[in-house]
Image (cartoon, rainbow, N blue to C red):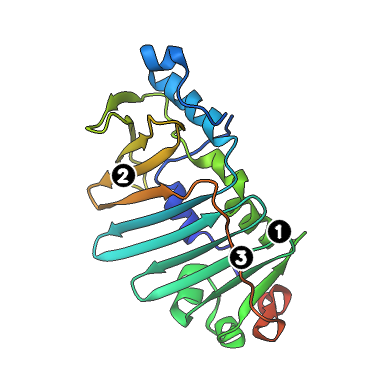
């Protein structure tokens, strides 16, 4: 079974990232004479004091439309990803991660074989803390993922929108496997300099990411033991 990455890849491919620091608004220097660098540092300061965020992503590639709903918390989180008629869901707790989905989601999005999917059925695959699969999910659905919420490009332009929020714009060059992408990240100019929205566009499609509910509680409902199947059992299937 391959590592699950679709929804996380979707969110992170919109070129966000951060390791952060203070819950205050932009510094006086940044507010008087802001630059792309000073705004990024202000976001880093603000995010360092946040314990959670809710993320909603909508995207399209050709005729395929996808959505991702992600709740990232300090010690756990949840994610649901839908692409066409395929869908998968993840729940991460301090002790285990649980992965579930419909047949096409588990096969086409996660990478299970038909035999493995049949073995799983409607159950959730449980990955215990301390295993490599768990580590991958845990790093993506806890606040350590904040390290990927800001652009890494050094060629940023800074502007303001109609609400006077800060807007960073950058271009990710095309590669042999991906088209050129133009991205804009809107950052609040209010009491906390936190990301509000990112829009990414390319010739073949694009996506919009909305950030909200910073610092709110993130529930991590887990399935009953009778409805789970160990990762080790599935990987051998």
Q: Which residue is mark 2?
A: 199
The image quarter containing residue 189 is top left
177 or 195: nearer the viewer: 195
Give the left or right position of residue 90, taking residue 158 as reference.
right
Give the left or right position of residue 34, taking residue 42 as reference.
left
Task: Indicate which disc residue 220 carries.
Answer: 3
Q: Residue at x 37, y 49 (%)?
A: 209
Instruction: Give the mark nearest the N terminus, 2 or 3.
Output: 2
Helix, strand or loop at label 1? It is helix
4 or 99: nearer the viewer: 99
100 or 106: nearer the viewer: 100
Q: Residue at x 60, y 66 (%)?
A: 91
In this orientation, does residue 33 appear? no
Instruction: Give the mark nearest the N terminus, 1 or 3.
Output: 1
Task: Indicate which disc residue 212 carries.
Answer: none
Mark 1 burial class by Cα count in 10 Å: few <14, some 14-19, many 20+:
few
Q: Residue 12 at x, y = what percent? A: 46, 47
Disc 1 from disc 2: Cα separation: 32 Å
Q: Residue at x 33, y 57 (%)?
A: 58
Q: Residue 177 at x, y = what percent? A: 37, 49
Frontmost of labels 1 and 2 is 2
User: Is 149 located above or below residue 237 in the figure?
Assistant: above
């Amino acid at each position: 079974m391959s590592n699950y990455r679709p929804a996380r890849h979707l969110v992170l491919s919109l070129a966000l990232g951060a390791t952060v620091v203070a819950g205050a608004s932009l510094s006086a220097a940044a507010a008087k004479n802001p630059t792309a660098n000073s705004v990024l540092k202000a976001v880093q300061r603000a995010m360092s004091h946040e314990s959670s965020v809710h993320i909603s992503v909508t995207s399209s590639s050709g005729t395929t439309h996808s959505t991702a709903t992600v709740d990232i918390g300090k010690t756990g989180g949840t994610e649901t990803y839908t692409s066409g008629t395929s869908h998968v869901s993840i729940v991460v707790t301090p002790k285990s991660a649980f992965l579930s989905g419909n047949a096409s989601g588990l096969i086409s999005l996660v990478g299970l074989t038909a035999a493995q999917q049949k073995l799983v059925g409607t159950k959730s695959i449980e990955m215990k803390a301390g295993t490599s699969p768990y580590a991958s999910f845990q790093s993506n659905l806890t606040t350590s993922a904040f390290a990927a919420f800001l652009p890494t490009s050094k060629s940023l332009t800074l502007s303001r929108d109609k609400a006077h929020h800060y807007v960073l714009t950058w271009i990710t060059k095309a590669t042999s496997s991906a088209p050129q992408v133009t991205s804009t990240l809107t950052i609040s100019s209010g009491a906390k300099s936190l990301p509000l929205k990112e829009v990414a566009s390319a010739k073949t499609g694009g996506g919009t990411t909305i950030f909200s509910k910073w610092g709110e509680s993130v529930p991590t409902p887990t399935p009953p033991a009778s409805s789970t199947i160990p990762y080790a059992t599935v990987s051998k299937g």
